[in-house]
Image (cartoon, helix red, strand yellow):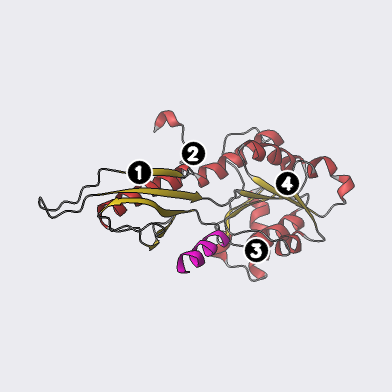
Amino acid sequence: MKILEEQLKAEKEGISYALLTVAETEGTSPCKVGKKMLLLDDGTTFGTVGGGEFERQALEEAAQAIKDRQSFFKRYTHIPTYEEQGLGCSFQVSLLVEVVCPTLLLVVCGAGHVGSAVLRLARIVHFETILIDSRRPDQIQETIELADRFISCETFESGISSTSIHDGAYYLCCAPTHTQDKSALKGALQKNFAYVGMLGSIKKTKEIYLQLEQDGINRDLLEQVYTPVGLDICDMSPEEVAFSVLAEILMLKNGGTGRSRKDR
């Protein structure tokens, strides 16, 4: 029951994990068919599949599987016991490792030129997308069709707060006006986010931060916002800004540096 509870908690919080299940055993094995173990992305474990060198090796390979986002089934046939001759147990184990990763979710606040371009690119890199906008659907229909979901709202803050968005989502504030971006940013910062970016100048950012601090938003939280948004690689056209935004998001998601791979 504990493992199931932790699985559900991980999925709610957007945490990747691997579920290890003993499928078959042969010989004198400390493993029992049906035994399960949960490995979270941060290395936390629950349960056991038998302990010892087998479990250590299985966890190491499961951790790599989480990084690769790839489940596997493996038969372990040569398991060292490090016992004196005649004292070790000889056994073989078949293990199913099921990797579950949260959906990569990008919430785009604003259906303008940059928002539309970001939605097009996000699909290519396998993000699920939510578009939030306060305009009438018939005014932005082409952009709505680029998103997986569309949320119509009176304010961006209310649109975000009233929508079921799992923890670890990515948010981009690119609304038509500064007031609307402030609303979107305030809504996003009240979620458990992986990334929040906002389009605009340094001057705009300072003004919005000052107002949000007056509204009770902690300065440390504001410092986590990526703004001006995107990597310094574009010519400021909507398409290249969108590309720079997705590049920044992928850099964060994959633990990259933003440097040329040639210089690594």
Q: Is residue 225 above or below residue 211?
A: above
Within 10 Å of the Cα at label 1, are there few (<14), some (14-19), or many (20+) other Cα atoms? few
**Residue 2 on the magenta span:** yes
Where is residue 128 drawn, in percent x and y? 66, 46
Between the residue at mark 3 and the residue at mark 1, the CA separation in whole angstroms equals 59 Å
Say which quadrant the C terminus sits in: top left
What is the three-letter code of the residue carrying label 4? Asp
Q: Is residue 237 visible?
A: no
Task: Kindly identify the amino acid type of the residue bearing the numbered disc 3.
Answer: Leu
Outermost residue to the front: 27
> Which residue in the structure is indicated by mark 3?
210
Residue tagged by mark 4?
Answer: 148
Q: Residue furthest left?
A: 85
Look at discs 3 and 1 and give the one toward the viewer. Answer: 1
Residue holding disc 1: 75
- Find numbered disc 3 in the image and state the secondary structure of the residue it sits on: helix
Side (left or right) of 64 relative to 139: left
As displayed, is residue 11 above or below residue 80?
below
Is disc 3 in contact with disc 1, using a CB cutoff of under 8 Å? no
Residue under the image location 73 percent in, 46 percent down: 148
Q: Tag 2: residue type?
A: Gly
Q: Residue 258 bears which disc, if any?
A: 2
Query: Quick one: 218 or 150, which is closer to the camera?
Result: 150
Q: Residue at x 62, y 63 (%)?
A: 191
Numbered range of the magenta stretch: 1-12
Left or right of 232? Residue 85 is left
**Labels 3, 4: front one:** 4
Secondary structure beneath label 4: loop
Residue 99 visible:
yes
Tell which tag, 3 or 2, sits nearer the viewer: 2
